[in-house]
């Protein structure tokens, strides 16, 4: 009975870890497409209002020339390349865990 419970616990944990990595991979792919969409739509807009002072600034501006507000994207999830790398990495890890999950299930 204890052996059966231990096997079920292992399978449960393995399933949760698999689901976690697959969801992270899916999230990375969704963020990649969102970032591509934002890059395309931002290029069509030449000017935008500054969020801090309201003056009109370029849509590609890094710093507002009027008030100095920074518009640098410092987050990794805003990078298309970073999202592609994370998507591939988490998807491959998730698929390897699925393979391990199936092997464990078939051998027990």
Image (tube, rainbow, N blue to C red):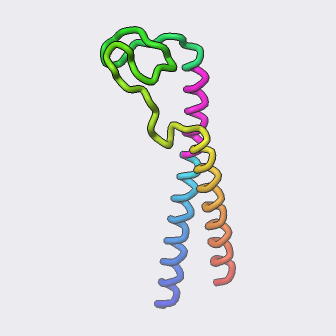
Q: Is residue 89 above or below residue 99?
A: above
Q: Position of residue 99 (x, y in %)?
A: 68, 69
State left or right for residue 36 relative to residue 74.
right
Query: Is residue 40 located in the magenta-colored stretch of the structure?
Result: yes
Q: Position of residue 93 (x, y in %)?
A: 61, 62
> 108 and 41: which one is in front?
41
Q: Is residue 50 above or below residue 88?
A: above
> 59 and 15: which one is in front?
59
Query: Is residue 25 located in the magenta-colored stretch of the structure?
Result: no
Q: Is residue 84 above or below residue 35?
A: below
Taking the spot 61% from the left edge, 67% from the top edge, the residue there is 97
State left or right for residue 67 relative to residue 72.
left
Taking the spot 38% from the left edge, 15% from the top edge, the residue there is 65
> 50 and 38: which one is in front?
50
Taking the spot 64% from the left edge, 76% from the top edge, the residue there is 105
Q: Position of residue 14 (x, y in %)?
A: 54, 71
State the extent of the magenta-drawn residues as a range. Answer: 28-41
Report the number of discs: 0
**Image quarter of the C terminus:** bottom right
> 108 and 94: which one is in front?
94
Q: Is residue 98 above or below residue 22?
A: below
Secondary structure mostly seen in the magenta stretch = helix
Taking the spot 49% from the left edge, 71% from the top edge, the residue there is 13
Q: Position of residue 61 (x, y in %)?
A: 47, 20
Q: Which of the 4 image quarters holds residue 100?
A: bottom right
């Amino acid at each position: 009975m204890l052996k059966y419970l231990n096997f079920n616990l292992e399978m449960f944990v393995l399933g949760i870890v698999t689901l976690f990595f697959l969801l992270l991979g899916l999230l990375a792919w969704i963020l990649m497409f969102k970032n591509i969409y934002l890059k395309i739509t931002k290029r069509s807009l030449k000017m935008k209002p500054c969020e801090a002072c309201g003056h009109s600034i370029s849509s590609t501006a890094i710093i507002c020339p009027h008030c100095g507000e920074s518009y640098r994207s410092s987050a990794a999830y805003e990078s298309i390349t970073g999202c592609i790398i994370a998507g591939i990495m988490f998807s491959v890890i998730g698929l390897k865990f699925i393979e391990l999950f199936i092997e464990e299930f078939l051998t027990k």
